[in-house]
Image (cartoon, rainbow, N blue to C red):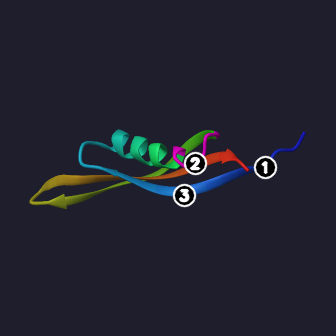
Amino acid sequence: MMSVVKVSELVGSSDENWTEAVNNAVLEASKNSDDILGVEVTNFTASIENGRVVEYRANIKIASHF
């Protein structure tokens, strides 16, 4: 049996940590799709001000049924 999966790329952000950045992106994606199958984290980045992390970002790919 063949299946097709749609993959969407998103960037989540948080001022707390990378886990929350991923969760924020998944939460936003779930507003448009009830059928999320999984997530792949492809990159972590952050913004720095005065030697401190002020924003965490996570690039993710969300897989859902097409």
- Give the image quarter of residue 19: top left
Query: Residue 15, relative to residue 11: is it above or below?
Result: above
Dot 3 alpha-carbon crowd within 10 angstroms: few under 14, some 14 to 19, many 20 or more:
some
Q: Nearer the viewer, residue 35 or 57?
A: 35
The residue tagged 1 is 4
Q: Residue, x 11% and y 57% (percent of image)?
A: 51
The residue tagged 2 is 62
Helix, strand or loop under label 1: loop
* Residue 14 as seen in the image, left or right of residue 39: left
Q: Earlier in the sequence, mark 2 or mark 3?
A: 3
Residue 59 shows which numbered tag? none
Q: Where residue 2 appears, x then y in whole percent? A: 87, 44
Instruction: Say which amino acid is labelled 2.
Output: Ile
Q: Marks 2 and 3: CB-CB under 8 Å?
A: yes
Look at the image and say whether residue 33 sits in the magenta stretch.
yes
Query: Residue 9, relative to residue 37: is it above or below?
Result: below
In magenta, the rendered stretch is 30-35
**Which of the image's four quarters has the N terminus?**
top right
Instruction: Say which amino acid is labelled 3.
Output: Glu
Q: Earlier in the sequence, mark 1 or mark 2?
A: 1
Q: Nearer the viewer, residue 40 or 65?
A: 65
Instruction: Say which amino acid is labelled 1.
Output: Val
The residue tagged 3 is 9
